[in-house]
Image (cartoon, rainbow, N blue to C red):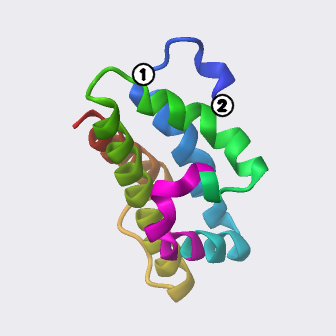
Amino acid sequence: MRERIGARPTVRELVDCLVVPYVELLDAAAGRSYVQIVAQLRGQFAAWRVESDAATTRYLARILDELESRPDAAPAVQRERVVGMIMLLTGAVAERARRIDDGAGNETDDAEFVDNLTTMCAAVLTG
């Protein structure tokens, strides 16, 4: 996805590269379990570069680095915003996974969920 959006992506386009594949994990029971486990690790999100495995870092690093390096705020603030965005993303998807597993249903369809989550995550990053 990242390669398709070109050299000068918007924050929303970069966030979409994170949201869409993560939400796709909800399609399978194992994926739903995975996102719920990841959400439980939120205390470690600030150390994502150190804690992530090589495959995860390879795919995430470029996008997260791009988001952190945007000139919208001081570097430390951008880093905090990226961690906040990761917390929002993982928490929202984990809650949707829980509702699916519990048979509780969701108020929005998948496309609306992705669009709204992308909008919220982009808003966190732009302050």
Residue 94: x %, y % from top left: 49, 71
Q: Secondary structure at mark 1?
A: loop
Left of 3 or right of it: where is 5? left
Label 1 Cα crowd, 10 Å radius (few <14 / some 14-19 / many 20+): some
Q: Main secondary structure of the magenta part?
A: helix
Tags 1 and 2 touching, CB below 8 Å: no
> Is residue 116 depicted above or below 8 in this figure?
below
> Which mark is on residue 110?
none
Q: Based on the picture, tell me whether residue 35 belongs to the magenta stretch.
A: no
Residue situated furthest top in the rendering: 7
Residue situated furthest bottom in the rendering: 102
Which residue does the image show at 48% across and 64% down from the upper left?
93
Which residue does the image show at 62% across and 53% down from the upper left?
50
Residue 15: x %, y % from top left: 47, 38
Q: Based on the picture, tell me whether residue 42 belongs to the magenta stretch.
A: yes
Tally of numbered tags: 2
Which residue in the protein does label 1 denote?
A: 10
Residue extent of the magenta highlight: 37-49
Residue 3: x %, y % from top left: 68, 22
> Which of marks 2 and 1 precedes in the sequence?
2
The quadrant of the rendering that contains the C terminus is top left
Which residue in the protein does label 2 denote?
A: 1
Q: What amino acid is labelled 1 in the image?
A: Thr
Which residue does the image show at 32% across and 20% down from the upper left?
71
Camera-side residue: 17 or 29? 17
The quadrant of the rendering that contains the N terminus is top right
Residue 49: x %, y % from top left: 60, 49
Q: What amino acid is labelled 2 in the image?
A: Met
